[in-house]
Image (cartoon, rainbow, N blue to C red):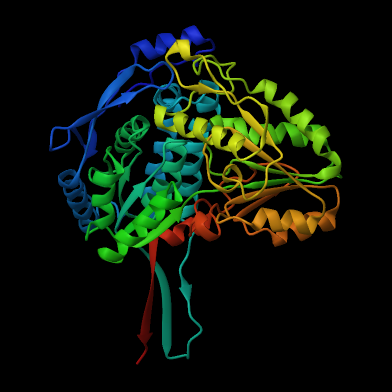
Amino acid sequence: MSDPVVSRTPDTQEDWQALADRLSIEGRARINGTYQWAENGETFASVSPVDGRELARVASCDQADANQAVTAARGAFERGIWSRQPPTHRKAVLLRFAELIEAHGDELALLETLDMGKPISHARAVDVPATARAIRWTAEAIDKVYGELAATPHDQIGMISREPVGVVAAIVPWNFPMIMASWKIAPALATGNSVILKPSEKSPLTAIRLAALAEEAGVPAGVFNVLPGYGHTVGKALALHMDVDCLVFTGSTSVAKQLMIYAGQSNMKRVWLEAGGKSPNIVFADAPDLKKAAAEAASAIAFNQGEVCTAGSRLLVEESIRNEFIVLIRDALKTWRPGHPLDPATTCGAIVDQAQLDRIIEYIDIGQAEGATLVEGGKRVMEETGGLFIQPTVFDGVQNTMRIASEEIFGPVLSVIGFRSAEEAIAIANDTIYGLAAAVWTSNLSTAHKTAKALRAGSVWINHYDGGDMTAPFGGFKQSGNGRDKSLHAFDKYTELKATWLLID
C-alpha cells in the first residue's frame, strides 16, 4: 500500500510548489496491472499550462496497445474475477477506492492543476471530493438495485435482470479529468464490467494514477486499464474495436458524431455521449436578488476558466434591467481575475494549452468583427510567466445568430443577449443545436415553471446556477448527447436487460 504524499494540506503557494518539486509523475499506460510504455515506443510531452514546463513524457498508445488492453479486459471479464463477484464485494472495493482518492487528495489535486491549469483550491475542494463522492455513492447504490418479475400466469415466471455489458471503453475530456472519469468508471465497475479509460492527451496524469489506486483498493488486474494517447490513434482504435461492447464519451459534438460512425462501422457497440453546450442563463427583471444572480452568472462563465460544458455562456437579460445587470456582472468578475494556479487565493487559472488559448482569442476577435461590444476583459495576461492566461470576457449587444452566441468556445467568454418577454427568452434559449443546461432567475413561480418546462435542456436550474448532486441524472437534449451520467439512471448505460422465462410443469 502506498502512502499519501503529505498528511497536511498545504495552505500557501510556496507549500504547493514545494510539494510539486517532490512529486513523482507516472506517464506510462496501465494495462493488466502493470505500467508500460506504448508498444510503438512513442511518447508525447505533458506540458503544464501554468508555466510551460514539461511535466513528464507520456506513453502515446495506439492500435497495438488498444488490442492488448481489450484482451486483458475481456479475459478478466470472462474469468469472472470481477464480473461475477457479489455486488457487496464490488461495493466494498469501490468504497476503499474512494477512501484512497481522499487519502491522496493533495497529490491528485496537484497533478490536476499542473496538468490542465485549474486553480489548486478548486482542484482540492471540488475535483477530488467530487471524484470520491461519485465512486462512493455509486458503490453504495449497487447492492440496492434489484431485478423484476413480470406479471405472468400462475404456471410461468418471467424474470427481468441486468447483466454487465462486458468491456467498456471510456473516453473523457481534459477540463475535469478526474470527475468526468469517475462518472464513467464508477457505474461501469460497480455493475461488473471491465473498463479501459482513455484520458485526453491534454490531461492524462490523474487517470494513470487512479488506475494504480483502484488496484490498491482491490480491483483485479485487467479490470481497469488506462491508455493515454491521441483521439485519432488509440481513441479511434477503441471506438472501432470489435471486442469493445460499450463506448462512453464526454467531449465535443463533432467527435461524438464521429464515434457514432465508428460504432456503426464496427460491431454496433453501445454508444453513450455527453457532448457540447451553449447554455442559456435567463435573468428576468423580477429575479429575487440581482446581485446574487450576477455573482452566479460570473461564476458560470469564469469557473474553471470557462472550460465547462455547462458554462452559462449565453446570458439572456430582460431589457429593463440589462444595463444595470451588466454593471453588476463586471463588478462580480473582479473576483475572477487570472492568477498563479498554485496560489490558493487564485480563482481563474491557466487555459489548458496554446491551441485552446488561440481558439478563445480567435472568438474574441470574431465577436468584435461581428459587431458585438466588448465591455470587459478580452486580453491575454501574465505572458511573462510562460503560462496561458486570459481575462474573463463579456460582450454586450450580442445577437443569437452571432458565432460567439451559437458556437461553443470553451473559454471565459460571455455573450449578453436582451429579451422583452418570457416567450422571446424561451425562443432565444432554445434556438441552438445544443440542449445541455439552462437557468432561470425569477420571483414568479408560474414564470419559473413555465420557462423551465419549455426549455429543451437536460438540466434546468431555478434561481441558482449549476446545481444538483449524484442523485440527479446529467446529460443533454439534441446535439448535447444521449444517455445520462450520475444517479441510478447511469446504470442503464453499462448493463443489458435480460428476460428469462420459466414454464412451471
Residue at coordinates 43% horizontally, 74% vertically from top-left?
Answer: 160
Residue 295 locus on image (x, y percent)? 73, 31
Q: Quadrant of residue 259?
A: bottom left
Residue at coordinates 59% horizontally, 22% vertically from top-left?
Answer: 347
Residue 453, above or below 226: below
Residue at coordinates 39% horizontally, 14% vertically from top-left?
Answer: 20
Q: Quadrant of residue 369?
A: top right
Classify the position of the C terminus by image quarter. bottom left
Q: In the current view of this chain or complex, which residue is farthest to the left?
A: 40
- Can residue 88 be seen here? The reply is no
Front-most of residues 497 and 287: 287
- Would residue 425 appear left or right of 446 to someone viewing this image? left
Classify the position of the N terminus by image quarter. top left
Front-most of residues 369 and 148: 369
Residue 311 locus on image (x, y percent)? 59, 40
How many numbered marks have been drawn onto this rendered protein structure? 0
Residue 158 locus on image (x, y percent)? 42, 81
Q: Quadrant of residue 213?
A: top left
Front-most of residues 211 and 102: 211
Front-most of residues 186 and 315: 315
Residue at coordinates 18% horizontally, 54% vertically from top-left?
Answer: 75
- Can residue 53 be seen here? The reply is yes
Residue 391 locus on image (x, y percent)? 58, 23
